Amino acid sequence: MAEKLKVVPLSENCPCAEAARGKAHRDPCVVIILGASGDLTRRKLLPAIAALGRDGHLPERFCLMATGRKSMSTPEFVRSMMDGIDKHIEGGPPSAEVLERLSKVMEYVPANPADRGEIEHLGRRLEALESKYETEGNRLFYLSLPPSVVSDTVKTLSAAGLLTKGGTERSWQRVVVEKPFGTSLATAHMLNEDLREMLIEDQIFRIDHYLGKDTVQNLLMLRFANVLFEPVWNRNYVDHVQITVSEEIGIEGRGAYFEEAGILRDMFQNHLLQTLCLFTMEPPVNFTADAVRDEKTKVLRAIRQWRTPEEVARNTVRGQYGPGTMGGVVVPSYRQETGVAPGSTRETFAAVRFFIDNWRWQSVPFYLRSGKRLDRRISTIFLQFKTVPHMMFKATDSDRITPNSMLIRIQPNEGINISFQAKAPGVDVSLRTVSFDFSYNNGSTKRPPSAYQTLLLQTMDGDATLFTRRDETEAQWQIIDPILRAWQEGKAPSFPNYDPGTWGPSKSEELIERDGRDWFNG
């Protein structure tokens, strides 16, 4: 294990930290959550809004309208949301004053988002709420809805006059669309076409909560605010890169959803490919939404696609967890989960080897993997550099030098570790591995905001930097679709093929060992 050296933590008073604190005053607005009776609102959205209020980031004139199919009164909704805030808020509880303010500006209206009459009734209630809190017509629609109803919902909102293409002369109107954005290239393209008829691109915020994580955003700061790394961030010095997102939990009651999605759609098409883009993209001309997304899209278009069944078989692995125990607790197999077919061949684990065919990264392999019921919950990027070109220490016991590496911990224990070689103490000439380690928890009294807290704030500000653009979304599906098609048309492995608490099927080890490498499981 590498010995750690102490490093000085970053200052919270640096110019970039000051800029990150955002606007002092925001446009007044109303947030309208459609599908608000679902778990996302209670566990993520309302706790994030409460955290924004706690930290002084909500507009002075702000209100919230929630709607869903479930019949309940506004007081019932408020009680449920307050309980969710209490249980799920990150970074400490808000003050009593903030909670009281939120409770007073919430209103719940039962409505079917596809029913024109019910949406028109919602509109009348919305106008009354806007008048009461003087939000000046600025509307943020958050569609916490399945992809299959997004188009019809936006059409209904537009037909009812609640949503206008381009907004109005005096106010803005924005729509947040939750992932998954479609289920294939064809469905994503169709959804984009539908939204384009009713909205302009600047109004559409395709949310990927992974991009809201501080450590994911820090990839840009690490690369483009430091001269130290750029000279070696290329094929001349990098041996390979691994991106791992693993979870201990199973599908948590989402059997019906997971049967449709699987881990490739759920994690690779969005989270992992977006992380890969931020890690490998060229420097944008400036830190604006389109400049950043232009460079990410270039990466996506340069990723080598596996089109034939033979290419897919050689460069991908899929798995499904069986029954077993984790932490002394008996857990069911995927096929035993509620809502899952007894003979399901849906994957709960995937590993894929990619190459990026451009000047910077040609021939460097990128190994991506993600799965459920794995050994532990981690999200990491592991970069291994090439070994030194000449071994000059042959007279010592250091005939083999461990390559330098960088580990970026996205979660938990967010931070960065850089390992390198140094002389071991003593009279003999021998080497040891030591490391510089930066942790977000060192030297800072502030915890990073939750992903939804960051992204909701960006939508209020109209900043789409951390949201995916239309061409990005379709480029991601162009990479994933051929793999899904080959899996669907080919014979599935004998599932289940890995035990809970492991690192997935043995073939995932073979995938990387064929290249003379090993997975980093730290």
Image (cartoon, rainbow, N blue to C red):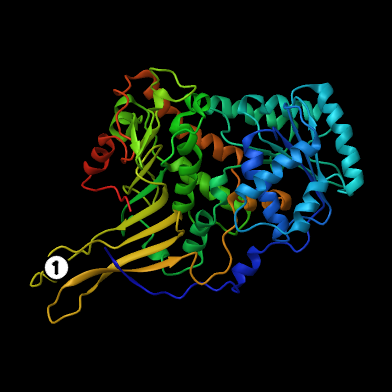
**Residue 386 as seen in the image, left or right of residue 84:** left
Q: Label 1's element?
A: loop
Query: Residue 228's x, y, as percent?
Result: 42, 69
Amino acid at circle 1: Ser
Query: Residue 249's x, y, as percent?
Result: 44, 39
Determine the residue located farthest toward the left in the rendered image: 395
Q: Nearer the viewer, residue 29 or 240?
A: 29
Above or below, 173 relative to 154: below
Above or below, 518 relative to 321: below
Query: Residue 160's x, y, as percent?
Result: 84, 28
The quadrant in which residue 233 appears is: bottom left
The quadrant in which residue 390 appears is: bottom left
**Residue 415 as seen in the image, left or right of residue 421:** right
Identify the residue at image location x=65%, y=49%.
86
Q: Nearer the viewer, residue 206 or 388?
A: 206
Residue where numbered disc 1 is placed: 398
Note whether residue 409 is visible. Answer: yes
Note whether residue 236 is visible. Answer: no
User: Which quarter of the image is occupied by the N terminus?
Assistant: bottom left
Q: Nearer the viewer, residue 265 or 60?
A: 60
